[in-house]
Image (tube, grey):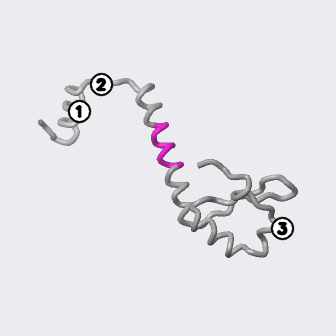
Amino acid sequence: MKISLQDDIDALSSVKNRIPAVFSETAQTNRAKIITHNGKPIGIMADIALYTDMIRKINMFKMVVEGEQSATSAPSISLSEVKKRLTAKYGISS
């Protein structure tokens, strides 16, 4: 999602008197609002559904990165070795 300078960025002085409306807008548009003070970004406003969705996506990306790192750095074992270990540990056999 690209940031729209016109729609997604707003000054703190403009937002502080209409906070409920801004939260409603973020819920309707499914886009966070970047809040600035003296022309510098200071925070983001988003309704709780958008926030939890962003956190869920961030966590998913973290797991993908960890999996990729594990797949490239951890020693690999053969399928027959996996079967042996499962059988030894849990009594599972094919």
State which quarter of the image contains the C terminus: top left
Kind of residue sitting beneath label 2? Ile
Lower sequence index among marks 2 and 1: 2
Give above or below for 85 relative to 33. Answer: above
Answer yes or no: do the residues labelled 1 and 3 have beta carbons within 8 Å? no
Question: What residue is at 45 percent from the left and 25 percent from the top?
Answer: 73
- Residue range in magenta is 58-66
User: Residues under labels 1 and 3: Cα distance?
Assistant: 63 Å
Q: Position of residue 33 (x, y in %)?
A: 68, 60
Looking at the image, which is closer to me, 32 or 78? 32
User: Residues under labels 2 and 1: Cα distance?
Assistant: 11 Å
Lower sequence index among marks 1 and 3: 3
Q: Where is residue 70 in the image (x, y as percent from the top left)?
A: 43, 31
Kind of residue sitting beneath label 3? Ser
Disc 2 secondary structure class: loop
Q: Position of residue 8 (x, y in %)?
A: 69, 57
Judge depth for marks 2 and 1 and give the one in front.
Answer: 2
Task: Check disc 2 and report the residue beneath it.
Answer: 77
Judge depth for marks 1 and 3 and give the one in front.
Answer: 3
Looking at this view, name the residue that lies furthest to the front: 6
- Circle 3 packing at 10 Å, graded few (<14), some (14-19), many (20+), is few
Give above or below for 11 relative to 4. Answer: below
Q: Where is residue 68 in the image (x, y as percent from the top left)?
A: 45, 32
Q: Is residue 26 left or right of residue 19?
A: left
Task: Check disc 3 and report the residue beneath it.
Answer: 13
Q: Could you tell me how many numbered marks the image carries?
A: 3
User: Residues under labels 2 and 3: Cα distance?
Assistant: 60 Å
Residue 68 belongs to magenta span = no
Task: Check disc 1 and report the residue beneath it.
Answer: 85
Residue 63 belongs to magenta span = yes
